Amino acid sequence: MIREVIFSTSNKRGKHHMAPFGVIVRGKSLVIAPFRPSRTLDNLLENPEAVINYTDDSYLYAALVVGKGRYRVFPAQKVKGFVLQNALAHSEVKVIKIKDDPERPELHLKKIHEKMHKPFQGFNRAQSAVIEASILISRLGILPIKEINKQILIHKNCIDKTAGSNEVAAWKLLMNRLNQFVRQRKRK
């Protein structure tokens, strides 16, 4: 199973970085497998501690993917890291094993501390569509553009039927990034 989260890392100097990430859950084991290059990977190699932030803010996923994420953080309790202020819950983790790979290494994580902040009220379909589209947009240049466009059309239906203003704004950010990518490819 893969859980979509906001993953928080920091480098040796304490500068934090937030990124949407799929955390692989294998029983009690947690694994991330970032594609190279990755600031998340670079930070974890410098400081093997991080925070998994669980949030229902789908706009934040989209904003972070397109480089426009604004958020507030506070220091983690048990690791050298930062917690997303509006997280529903978070897990503080340490890297315990690295399976190196030139394209996509696997980093195995151990939970050190976990805290609930507020209740989860459930997703609407548009929030899920924004998260799926965020993943697709993060794969621009990796996946074929035809496949991305095909999937975007499927998810757009959920936006049209169930989106609130937050999801509409997130979708607009993602589609602007997609259109920018397509225009840049046409110029080449």
Image: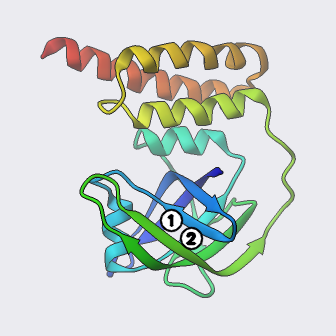
Q: Residue at x 43, y 18 (%)?
A: 147
Residue 65 image position (x, y, % from top left): 45, 41
| Residue 135 shows in this picture | yes
Residue 134 image position (x, y, % from top left): 52, 35
The secondary element bearing badge 1 is classed as strand
Q: Earlier in the sequence, mark 1 or mark 2?
A: 1
Q: Is residue 169 left or right of residue 127?
A: left
Quadrant location of residue 61?
top right
Quadrant location of residue 43?
bottom left
Residue 127 image position (x, y, % from top left): 70, 33
| Residue ID for mark 1 | 8
Q: Residues within 10 Å of mark 2 (few under 14, many from 20)?
A: many
Q: Are marks 1 and 2 in contact (CB under 8 Å)?
A: yes
Q: Residue at x 79, y 38 (%)?
A: 123
Instruction: Give the amino acid at mark 2.
Output: Val
Indicate which disc residue 51 carries. Answer: 2
In this view, the residue farthest toward the left is 188
In this view, the residue farthest toward the bottom is 78
Gap in angstroms between the C-alphas marked 1 and 2: 5 Å
* Observer-nearest of 6 and 104: 104
The secondary element bearing badge 2 is classed as strand
Q: Residue at x 49, y 47 (%)?
A: 69
Question: Relative to 80, is 84 above or below?
Answer: above
* Observer-nearest of 31 and 89: 31
